[in-house]
Image (cartoon, coloured by chain):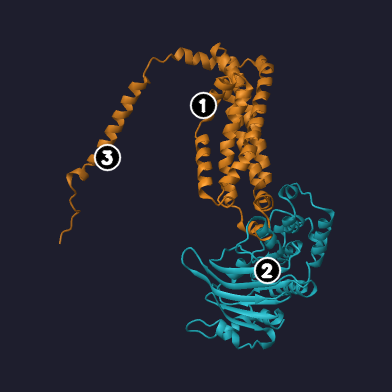
Chain colours: A orange, B cyan
Amino acid sequence: MKQSIPKRPMMKEWHVIGFTIFLLLVFAVILSAQATGVGQDFSSEQFFDLWAKMANPDWSYIPDIITPLLQTIQMAIVGTLIGCVAAIPVALVSASNIVRNPYVRGVVRFIMNLVRSIPEMLLAALFVAVVGIGALSGVCALSVFSFGMMFKLLYEAIETVDQGPIEAMRAAGGNRNQVIVFAVIPQVLNQYLSFFLYTLEINVRASAVLGYLGAGGIGLYLNTTLEMFRYDRTAVVILGILVVVVLVDALSNKLREALS
Amino acid sequence: MTEKKGNIEIKNVSKVYPNGTVGLKDINLNIKQGEFVMIVGLSGSGKSTLLRSINRLHDVTDGEILIDGQDITKATGNKLHKIRRSTAMIFQNYNLVKTSSVYRNVMSGRVGYYPAWKAALGLFTKEDQEMVKTNLARVNLLDKYYVKARDLSGGQQQRVGIARAMMQEPSVILADEPVSGLDPKTTKLVMNDLKKLNEEDGMTIILNVHSIGLALKYSSRIVGLKEGRIIYDKPIAEVDKRDFKEIYREAGDDSSVEAGNDVEED
């Protein structure tokens, strides 16, 4: 008896659906490119000019950027500190093992999710408009950003603590605050410090560009050097940011390893 | 801790879990100050539920539990905290904060006596710090004062749990399978600690246990639970070993009596 591969319908034999989708995608990419003007004139001259200038950094610019670099770090530290401290009570209220009322938790979490959904650059732009140009608006933006981030990390950590000690404190006649102080905080302290360092790392990176919007720090110098076509100085600024970010990351990693 | 405190009256207590499981059915139990009551029964018979209800770690559906005349099932706020303070609990899993020192764990038993902010700042009185030392010395762990709880063995952790319970200056100690994770030697240490509290300090002790040997050796009264009901309740003098057959009997087996006899002779 002769056996044969079963015959497939024409549609499947020639992969009609797959090819159609592929062609549609290609078409969509071409249309989007046209709509956004990707194909516009590209000046390779300017491009190589930028590279050439950036390859010869103006090292004499270093003393000028030390202060703003330090300001960037300071902004990050202050912003992280304010945001992370403010996040503690809110995180406690949203943790299901601390607050039993699901409506209270739900409302708090909803508001916090709104806060977290605002990107930090947008926050900076908002605060520059409200507070004015300067480091304060940067600090405000970073505070709100850290607040949202720490809130999320912390309440999840609180919800996963060992329930035993909480039960023991309740059994010993402790009220809610005492339960928190004696059973919850000791269990999440290390994690909290670790989250703090992690948030700081991210904030240092973020605050480097916040100045671009006028929110203080090194970003302002990035902006001015670019606008004056001093790419040799831009290179120095970028290298400065790189050094700071790498140093803070390394330090934070070391400390976090020590914590765990 | 006056000598007359530590009476527990459980009246018509029933407990139905939200999913419909019946935890306790019409429990009536009168425990007098100074008794050492062991509650025996199969897993799922309601032992833990009963013990936890006395401290209101579980709410009961019906009935009342009077601790020295005060009904804990309806107490709220400060009153509830005060009653809980007088009924210390010892747990199967020790429930210590593993990352905290022994000192801090023991001191935490004292929280019921402080306003929250004072306790948070660690503003404990000299007397209470002395009390930590005394209680740790009683369980022979004074040398572990600064050690973190997670670095202790199970038996040591349980004895820290006992020291913590003692900080409450309770009149009742509720122990929920306190020795089920421990070897026979450590079991003996822990049980002797509890016996001492019972005999020297006159505390009422209620203890859940799986081992019949332990029950016969230490208790002054044995209560048997089965499917949420009390099916056995006798002072130790009247207890016959054969009685356990009934408590531990399940449909289709009658050999489970031997299971609990292992620790009896040590």
Is residue B210 something one can see in this rendering? no
Among the two numbered marks 3 and 1 on one chain, the one whose residue lies closer to the N terminus: 3
Which residue shows up at 27% across the image and 33% down it?
A23
Frontmost of labels 1 and 2 is 2
Instruction: Give the vertical position of A46 relative to B188 (above or below).
Output: above
Q: Are marks 1 and 2 on the same chain?
A: no
Picture coordinates of residue A198 (x, y %)?
61, 38
At label 2, counting other C-alpha atoms closer than 10 Å, the crowd grade (few under 14, some 14-19, many 20 or more) is few
Which of the chains bears the disc numbered 2?
B
From the viewer's perspective, tell me whether residue A145 is left or right of residue B83: left
Report the quarter where the N terminus of chain A lies.
bottom left
Q: Position of residue B141 (x, y in %)?
A: 79, 64
Instruction: Identify the residue at the far left of this view.
Output: A1
Q: Give percent across and percent down for residue B157.
A: 71, 63
Please rate how many residues cluster around mark 1, counting C-alpha atoms within 10 Å: few if below 14, some from 14 to 19, many from 20.
few
Q: Tell me how far mark 2 sits from mark 3, CA to CA.
A: 79 Å
- Mark 2 lies on residue: B69
Q: Nearer the viewer, residue A219 or B36?
A: B36
Q: Position of residue B7 (x, y in %)?
A: 70, 72
- The residue lying toward the viewer, choosing from A45 and B129, is B129
Judged from the image, the secondary structure of the residue bearing numbered disc 1 is helix
Residue B174 vs A41, above or below: the answer is: below
